[in-house]
Image: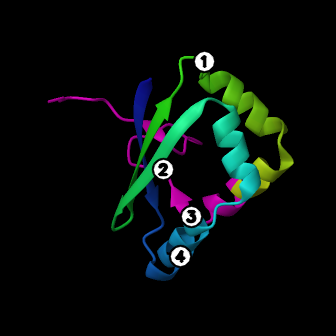
């Protein structure tokens, strides 16, 4: 199993952050299905103020490009992504249009 860690910021507004957290307590079933069907075996999102960190554990068959292509074709995923962008903003230093950015692992015990 491979593990990835990604970062994203939320718009720094307590009301919007609360809404975002609420959506993630009841993620749409179509989104869960798209995650699992891509070979993502575990996903966790952590928050500190408006900074998010996502940890994904994926199977050897996981292919990020295939997931992105499938998501692009999935109307429900696109609807979710448009909705989430209301709450999200790229971290400083991210390329234009990027949401979640890969973090570099610098330590392991």
Quick check: marks 4 and 3 in contact, CB under 8 Å? no
Q: Which residue is mark 4?
A: 16
At numbered mark 2, what does the secondary structure look like: helix, strand or loop? loop
Q: CA distance from mark 1 to mark 4?
A: 35 Å
Q: Which residue is mark 2?
A: 90
Q: Are marks 3 and 1 in contact (CB under 8 Å)?
A: no
The residue sitting at the top extreme is: 60
Q: Tally the marks.
A: 4
Which residue, as the protein is rendered here, is positioned at the far left? Answer: 109
Give me the C-alpha separation between circle 2 and circle 3.
Answer: 18 Å
Viewer-side label of 2, 1:
1
Image vertical order of residue 101 relative to residue 20, above or below: above
**Residue 41, position in %: x, y?**
54, 35
Determine which of the numbered discs, if any, sits on residue 61 in the image: 1
Between 93 and 50, the residue placed more toward the observer is 50
Residue at the disc numbered 3: 24
């Amino acid at each position: 199993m491979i593990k990835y860690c990604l970062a994203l910021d939320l718009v720094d507004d307590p009301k919007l952050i609360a809404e975002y957290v609420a959506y993630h307590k009841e993620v749409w079933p179509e989104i869960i299905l798209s995650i699992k069907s891509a070979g993502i075996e575990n996903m966790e999102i952590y928050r500190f103020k408006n900074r998010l960190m996502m940890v994904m554990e994926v199977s050897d068959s996981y292919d990020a490009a295939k997931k992105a292509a499938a998501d692009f074709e999935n109307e429900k995923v696109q609807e979710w992504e448009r909705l989430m962008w209301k709450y999200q903003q790229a971290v400083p230093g991210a390329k234009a249009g990027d949401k979640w950015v890969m973090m570099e692992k610098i330590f392991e015990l």
